[in-house]
Image (spheres, coloured by chain):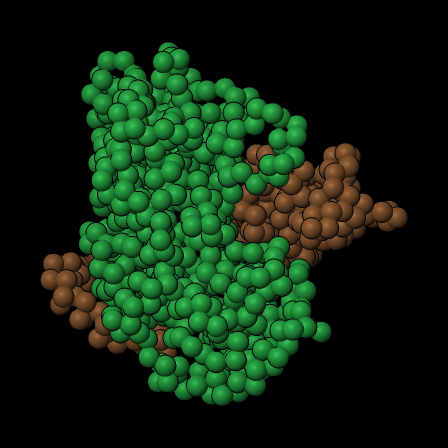
Chain colours: A brown, B green
Amino acid sequence: MNLIPVYIYGKKYLVPEGSTIITSIEYAGFKLKKGVGCREGFCGACASLYRLPNDYKLYGGLGCQTVVKPGMHIVQIPYSPAEKKVYNIDELTPNNEPFNKYFPEVYRCVSCNTCTKICPQEIQVMDYVQAVIRGDISLAAELSFDCIMCGLCNIRCPAEIPQFHVAMLARRLYGKYIQKKSDRLQKRLEEIKSGKYDEEIKKLMTMPKDELKKKYFLREIKLDTD
Amino acid sequence: MSGYPEYMYESLRKVDETRPKRLEMAKKGLINFLKPMTAEERDEVLSKYHPDYMPDARRKIRIGPNKGEELLSDVVDILEAHSIIDPDKFEIGEPDYETDVLIIGGGGAGCMAAIWASNEGAKVIISTKLRLGDANSMMSQGGMQASVNESDSPAIHYLDVIGGGHFDNKPELVRALVTDAPFITKFLEELGVMWDRDENGNLKTAAGGGTSRRRMLSCKDYTGAEIMRVLRDEVKNRPELITYLEYHPAVELILDEDNNVSGAILFDMETGEYLVVKAKVTIIATGGFGRLHIKGFPTTNHYGATADGLVMAYRAGAKLLYMDSAQYHPTGAIYPQQIYGFLITEKIRGYGGQPLNKDGELFVYPLEPRDVEASSFIRACATGQGIRTPDGKWGIWLDSPIIELIHGEGTIEKAFPAMFRQFRRFGIDIRKEPMLVYPTLHYQNGGIEIDEHCHSTIPYLLVAGEASGGVHGRNRLMGNSVLDYNVFGARAGIESAKLFRQREFKGRLHIEHIRNYEKELKENGIETKRRSPILLPEYRNLKTIEKHRKDFDPFLPAGL
């Protein structure tokens, strides 16, 4: 195993080449309680900042997805200090209004694009903030969909916008009010309420196991129709 | 440029060569060329290759409500163990919190239960080990089953579920699951979940392993993340009724003099402080056991998936069901090593992705139930049909480029942004090259036995989600766990709101069951240093630790 030097909170440790930030911190002997979550890139708990030797740039990444390099300086950001606003989604309208009320700071956006550059999910963060400013909630929802709410955008934003909270509200408004829906689901709900399937299910529930087994293995597999 | 080492090129070339023929088969309907296994073929591959049947996979438990039954050995290990709490030293005293409903676990089931309990006016405390929403729920990629299409019905869904579970599922739980599914879909829609839809607004549906209709609803391949973040947002919108305590795992339940469950002892992992919550109803929603690494497998599971609820409930006398079986997801990543064991969504196969051997041949129907599919992958590797990784593991190909040929260019980026990104981070473009996969520990099929209103076998303890047992028999189908935590989370919430209003506490609160359990350990000659719940898995470099701390005890739960 080839060991390489990294700096964890400024202290030098030797860790296996090919480690991620998370596994290198663990190898160094830390028992992680914060700054670690799903370990697969879906939860945003392990946001980290780092710099590389001879490079002025500050990089952001997910601890579980970022492979360490020799001489890397690493710090974890387990929490982004941003207030989650309390609202009743049933009382909101799918336009600028809720944002004016809860996140008026979005209008402070200076279009510097720092948020987009730091985003480990490669989301066009600035573009969705601008979409919110224009009242285009649908675009904001779609652009921000892959957000895992790690909060790195908020940490870096010179306008101090909690982008990931703004995006959360945009997506809920979009899913609830704007997304086009058919009446197919409603029909199914009414069928179930009317008891249409009760008897058939009851029959399956009380069927002798052998008969049920036979029925299962002979069932029609129909994957090509709605 | 290939993201794979050079020695794999030959095998990759064969995958490319067989693709046109396989595409043709896929276009005509794979089912016309390759039949799903018969009951006998399933039994054969399961009994020979499923990890549950490996030597020492199971052993008899010598203590507690399931005494004498064979359970997974790794589960027996944490059940035949001492409590973190010393009953001789711990005094319950005045509770630090009192509430109508205590929910242990802040994942999907816990948040759903909190929302529904608060809808009915209950005051709720959620105690959770990490952050709210840090759970397997967040990590589900592929989808949630609900019979929303016209060619489908809850009854057809029922048959798929019970067949997939080898007919061991509790029928009333399956009925609840399939009948509530469309309502849950609607409920989530009204909360603002962005379901995938077609241009007419119909919910998009995909096939899954063991489904006889297209029934998998999705939010790209971030289905769990989307649902979980919406539920979490909603929980946080209700501060008058819901309090959530992060980094506060529960470690033991508390009883009253009728031995009714009356809350729990929480543990602050940072300060080492213990807190007592007195609750009229307690709901366990602690999820599964992936981080126990059953049989040494890697896992798709969240860092906190250590089966804490199972341990607490068992010590308090609740019965477990089907803890003799674990689910291995057929498609875990086996290369590159940084993503070893990570989940590759079954939706890849739902969209036409094909499992192939080293010669690029399709060797199994791609949409068998998970245990059957996984076992056939293990068989392929055991019989020399696999591809070796640089560090000596074995895997088979999962052909993703064929998806772009079936559904059109751009499908992968659109339908699988998470998978596309995951592999690209490590230099593999899954639009052009297949993924190398092997089964990975994924799901706790069984759990604490419940009825259709989420009652465990002990009073005032409800259970929902992966911690519960009976819904899926001994094998869960894809998309039914997201459904499970929503359906039974809601049901537990509703039931708790009914129960708390009739609850009266008898006498003082106590933890005599811990003392009795310790006695039982001794009487059965069980000698162990182990303590449970373990709270977090141990991934530190033990050599480093030993150097710094002579008193290091690897069995000590986190933070102690």
Residue B495 visible somewhere in the drawing: no
Residue beneath the point at 50% across and 58% down: B343
Residue beneath the point at 39% across and 29% down: B528
Residue A140, placed above or below residue B498:
below
Residue B378, placed above or below residue B528:
below
Indicate the position of residue B121 as horizontal and vertical percent values: 33, 32
Q: How many numbered marks does the figure carry?
A: 0
Residue B465: which quarter of the image?
A: top left
Indicate the position of residue B124 as horizontal and vertical percent values: 38, 30
Indicate the position of residue B306 as horizontal and vertical percent values: 44, 40
Residue beneath the point at 65% across and 73% down: B7
| Residue B289 or residue B293, whichever sits in front | B293
| Residue A146 or residue B518, whichever sits in front | B518
| Residue A130 or residue B322, whichever sits in front | B322
Residue A208 visible somewhere in the drawing: yes
Left or right of B193 on screen, residue B99: left
Residue B328, placed above or below residue A223:
above
Residue beneath the point at 25% across and 61% down: B166
Residue B460: which quarter of the image?
A: top left
Indicate the position of residue B415 as horizontal and vertical percent values: 53, 67
| Residue B505 or residue B9, whichever sits in front | B9
Residue B426, placed above or below residue B298:
below
Quadrant that contains the N terminus of chain B: bottom right
